[in-house]
Image: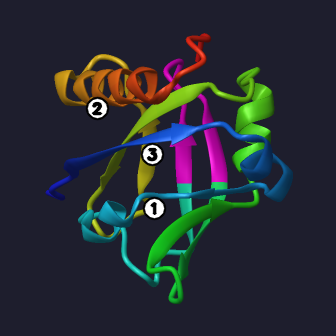
Amino acid sequence: MSSFSFDYCFLAEVTASNLNEDKLYLPVGATSSTPLHKQCQETILVNKEGNLWNVSLRFSESGGKYYITRGWRKFCLDNRCEIGDLFVFNVVGDEKTTPLMCVCTERKECSEILSKYLSRKSGESSLGGDL
């Protein structure tokens, strides 16, 4: 029986540049996520309703980061995302099958990541506007 890893959550923000480029860079910490490895060429994004989007996954040797391409824009459009929207993804996989990146809303760890980000972001904002 395969052992799946649920060991890495990360925050993704929808920006004008990542929509235009159809490219989302993952945090450097994703390189230590068990399900991801440099030979992995695709991943599946899963929204909270369980819908799936196949996207390409690449590794930038120069930047030392993974990035999602060819599918990020479609995921955002299909989910009616606006610039500034935030997602917390949980990377799930077993190193043998295509990894999943699931929108994470219920897990405590993911909620904490989002809360920390929002409090840090509001502390940095001198304009006092909404996110």
Q: How crowded is mark 1: few (under 14 residues within 10 Å), some or many (20 or more)?
A: some
Amino acid type at mark 2: Ile
For the point 53% across and 18% down, the residue is: 49
Q: In this view, does 126 lie above or below 99?
A: above
Circle on res. 83 = none
For the point 60% across and 17% down, the residue is: 127
Q: Quadrant of residue 102?
A: top left
User: For the residues marked 1 and 3, what is the alpha-carbon distance in whole angstroms?
Assistant: 10 Å
Marks counted in the figure total 3
- Work out whether residue 9 or residue 127 is closer to the camera in this orientation and state it: 127
The magenta stretch spans residue 119? no
* Residue behind mark 1: 98
Q: In this view, does 68 lie to the left or right of 6?
A: right
Q: Where is residue 91 in the image (x, y as percent from the top left)?
A: 35, 49
Q: Which residue lies furthest to the front in this view?
A: 126
User: For the residues marked 3 and 2, what is the alpha-carbon distance in whole angstroms?
Assistant: 16 Å
Magenta span covers which residues? Answer: 44-54
Q: Residues within 10 Å of mark 2 (few under 14, many from 20)?
A: some
